[in-house]
Amino acid sequence: MTSESRSIPAQRYLGELDAALAAAPASVRTDLLADIAGELDGLNDEEARARIAELGDPRAIAADATAQLRSMNPDQPSSLVYPTVTAVVLTVGWYVGLGWIAGLVLIGVGSGWTSAVRRRAILTSIAGAVVALAALLFFRTTDFGLVGLGVLLILPLLVNIFVGSFLRAHWGERSPA
């Protein structure tokens, strides 16, 4: 059943549940949303409100699903400390000597990401640095030399903030051993 044929309370509830499951792995999020949507499909507003009351708070459902997932996968990282530190080192490191390279190394050795996520993050960060350096070299011989310097200072910051956010979002999606 499409969302257009769902009652407004059901649509609201599924939206809240989707937001509460934002940190859950995509497969868990999709399955849980599909299951609960199936329970709410075809109900009028009053029936949907009654069923929603039985289901309970979407945040509690998300917390239960996450706790159950962690109990089934106890070796899965639960803390976002490592990806947060990696993101900070990568971003700030661009301005502090070899710190940026240390950030790339932290990405490379991080066991909480799949190899594809690590590869994308490293290549994106390097591409941002290359484009920034190319802009500096291109603009340095023109009247717009400060534009090149600005790009060198700002573009890697923006790219590495994006990469850090990407890494935090994909933390825990390790490759099967």
Image (cartoon, rainbow, N blue to C red):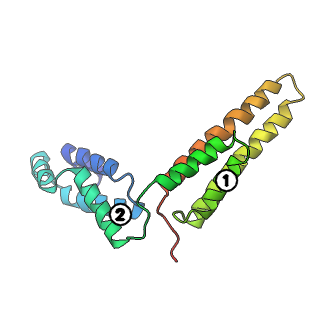
Left or right relative to 136: residue 39 = left
Badge 2: residue crowd in 10 Å (few <14, some 14–19, many ≥20): some
Residue at left offset 23%, top offset 47%: 13
Residue at left offset 67%, top offset 34%: 154
Q: Which mark is residue 36?
A: none
Quarter of the N terminus within the rendering: bottom left
Badge 1: residue crowd in 10 Å (few <14, some 14–19, many ≥20): some
State the residue in front, 114 or 100. 100
Numbered disc in front, either 1 or 2: 1
Q: Outermost residue toward the top?
A: 143
Q: SS of the residue at dot 2?
A: helix
Please state which amino acid type lies under the numbered disc 2: Val
Left or right relative to 124: residue 165 = left
Name above or below for residue 157 compared with residue 24: above
Please state which amino acid type lies under the numbered disc 1: Ala
Q: Position of residue 25 (x, y in %)?
A: 41, 61
Residue at left offset 24%, top offset 51%: 58
Q: Position of residue 68 (x, y in %)?
A: 29, 66
Q: Outermost residue toward the right?
A: 141
Q: SS of the residue at dot 1?
A: helix
State the residue in front, 107 or 35. 107
Q: Which residue is mark 1?
A: 102
Q: Position of residue 76 (x, y in %)?
A: 43, 67
Q: Which residue is mark 2?
A: 28
Residue at left offset 63%, top offset 41%: 92
Whichever of callouts 1 and 2 sits on the residue coming sooner in the sequence is 2
